[in-house]
């Protein structure tokens, strides 16, 4: 354990640059800001917080404006959800209520694929000579099923065939993205996070149908385990780390992730059953003893509270502070519910928030070494 780094810092692959940091040409169209966004991500996170706290830049997305309806705009093109859909072997388009799949290729999906290619081309230049982990975050297959709609206008959760196929489609999309990143940035090792926060609502049948008057039937734990296992086993390559799975803080979902063979599990330590010491933390400790990497989500403004809570719960289990070495910490603003349709501007991380997260990591390291 002593040879492990004190901690690792990653982000949710979002970054919002202040308008004053962009030229008039850069701020005119969101795609024009790709280069400075990647350069800033690299300059902040490419060299680590310090020698014992590595960090990783991201192929970052940032929405240009807040939109509640899903209007066809760059605000819904430059998002992790759009990037995931752009990589899938599916047709799709953007409707007033959100993304639809299986309806033929529309202008919005063409724009999303074009944007994904431009992001990769920008990475070739901004990350030239970079050697190390590079992070991306995508919705998991269950999150995709809850977020997108079929040609009939109903959520994909209500289509058994599409629900069955999405894990395979997502795994194929991740494999393609990995190959594309390796081509543009040969020294980068892609560090993928699959965001399945919201699984608990799906498991309990709390996702409303398109009409809003009914709820989709619950998706059982066995089905959730199969979804996770399919994506993890199909997308993992011998030369890359298995994707990190972000889940809701509930014992049933930790068990499902472990049964699926997850090697890295992440959750918000200030949510759900993690808010107090107990069975969930015992499961996390047991998973760690068996080689599973743990990631804790840090929301800007709540980093100190989250870090103190993690350390307190860890000590409740009988561990010394220095035995908390090696955790990953993931900066993220968006909650699962707010991510169901899109990532809006107020959900993307800002430069000051990332800098504050780095300072909190230094304090975390001081606590472990004290």
Image: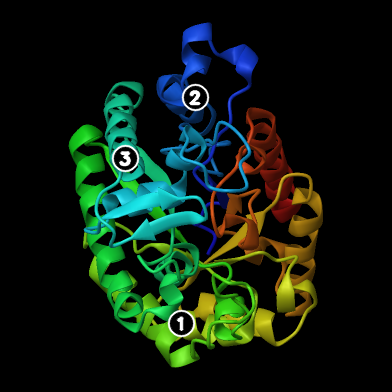
**In the image, residue 26 above or below residue 107:** above
Which secondary structure lies at badge 1? helix
Marks 2 and 3: in contact by CB < 8 Å? no
Residue 163 at x, y = what percent?
A: 36, 77
Q: Is residue 318 visible?
A: no
Q: Earlier in the sequence, mark 3 or mark 2?
A: 2
Instruction: Describe the colour scheme in one phrase.
Output: rainbow
- Quarter of the image holding residue 121? top left
Q: Which mark is residue 43?
A: 2
Instruction: Farthest residue to the top: give it.
Output: 24
- Quarter of the image holding residue 144? bottom left
Residue 183 at x, y = what percent?
A: 18, 38
Q: What residue do we see at 41% from left, 87% from top? A: 223
**In the image, residue 202 above or below residue 4:** below
Q: Distance between the residues labelled 3 and 2?
A: 34 Å
Which secondary structure lies at badge 2? helix
Q: What residue do we see at 63% from left, 56% from top? A: 338
**In the image, residue 335 above or below residue 132:** below
Task: Quickly name the residue at label 1.
Answer: 258
Q: Label 3: how many residues lie within 10 Å, few (<14), some (14-19) or many (20+)?
A: few
Residue 75 at x, y = what percent?
A: 52, 37
Q: Distance between the residues labelled 3 and 1?
A: 40 Å
- Left or right: 366 in relation to 263: right
- Left or right: 181 in relation to 192: left
**Which one is in front, 147 or 200?**
147
Q: Which mark is residue 107?
A: 3
Q: Which of marks 3 and 1 is nearer the N terminus?
A: 3
Q: What residue do we see at 35% from left, 23% from top? A: 126
Marks 1 and 2: in contact by CB < 8 Å? no
Q: Label 2: how many residues lie within 10 Å, few (<14), some (14-19) or many (20+)?
A: few
């Amino acid at each position: 354990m002593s040879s492990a780094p004190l901690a690792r810092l990653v982000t949710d692959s979002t970054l919002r640059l202040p308008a004053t940091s962009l030229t008039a040409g850069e701020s005119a169209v969101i795609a024009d800001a790709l280069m400075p966004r990647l350069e800033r991500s690299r300059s902040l996170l490419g060299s680590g917080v310090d020698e014992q706290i590595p960090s990783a830049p991201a192929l970052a997305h940032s929405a240009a404006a807040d939109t509640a309806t899903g209007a066809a705009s760059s605000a819904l093109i430059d998002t992790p959800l759009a990037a995931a859909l752009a990589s899938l072997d599916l047709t799709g388009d953007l409707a007033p209520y959100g993304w639809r799949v299986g309806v033929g290729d529309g202008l919005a999906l063409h724009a999303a694929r074009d944007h994904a290619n431009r992001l990769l081309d920008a990475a070739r230049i901004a990350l030239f000579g970079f050697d190390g982990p590079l992070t991306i975050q995508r919705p998991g297959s269950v999150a995709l099923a809850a977020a997108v709609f079929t040609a009939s206008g109903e959520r994909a959760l209500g289509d058994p065939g599409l629900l069955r196929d999405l894990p395979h489609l997502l795994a194929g999309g991740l494999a393609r993205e990995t190959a594309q990143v390796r081509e543009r940035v040969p020294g980068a090792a892609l560090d993928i996070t699959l965001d399945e926060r919201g699984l608990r609502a799906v498991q309990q049948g709390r996702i409303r149908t398109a009409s809003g008057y009914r709820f989709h039937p619950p998706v059982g734990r066995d089905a959730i385990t199969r979804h996770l296992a399919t994506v993890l086993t199909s997308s993992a390559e011998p030369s890359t780390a298995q994707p990190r799975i972000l889940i809701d803080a509930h014992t049933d979902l930790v068990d499902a992730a472990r049964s699926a063979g997850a090697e890295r599990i992440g959750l918000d330590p200030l949510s759900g059953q993690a808010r107090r010491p107990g069975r969930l933390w015992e499961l996390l400790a047991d998973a760690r003893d068996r080689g599973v990497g743990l990631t804790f989500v840090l929301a800007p403004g709540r980093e100190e509270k989250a870090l103190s809570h993690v350390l307190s719960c860890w000590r409740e289990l009988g561990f010394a502070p220095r035995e908390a070495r090696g955790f990953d910490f993931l900066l993220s603003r968006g909650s699962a519910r707010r991510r169901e349709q899109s990532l809006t501007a107020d959900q993307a991380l800002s430069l000051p928030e990332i800098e504050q997260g780095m300072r909190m990591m230094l304090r975390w390291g001081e606590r472990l070494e004290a």
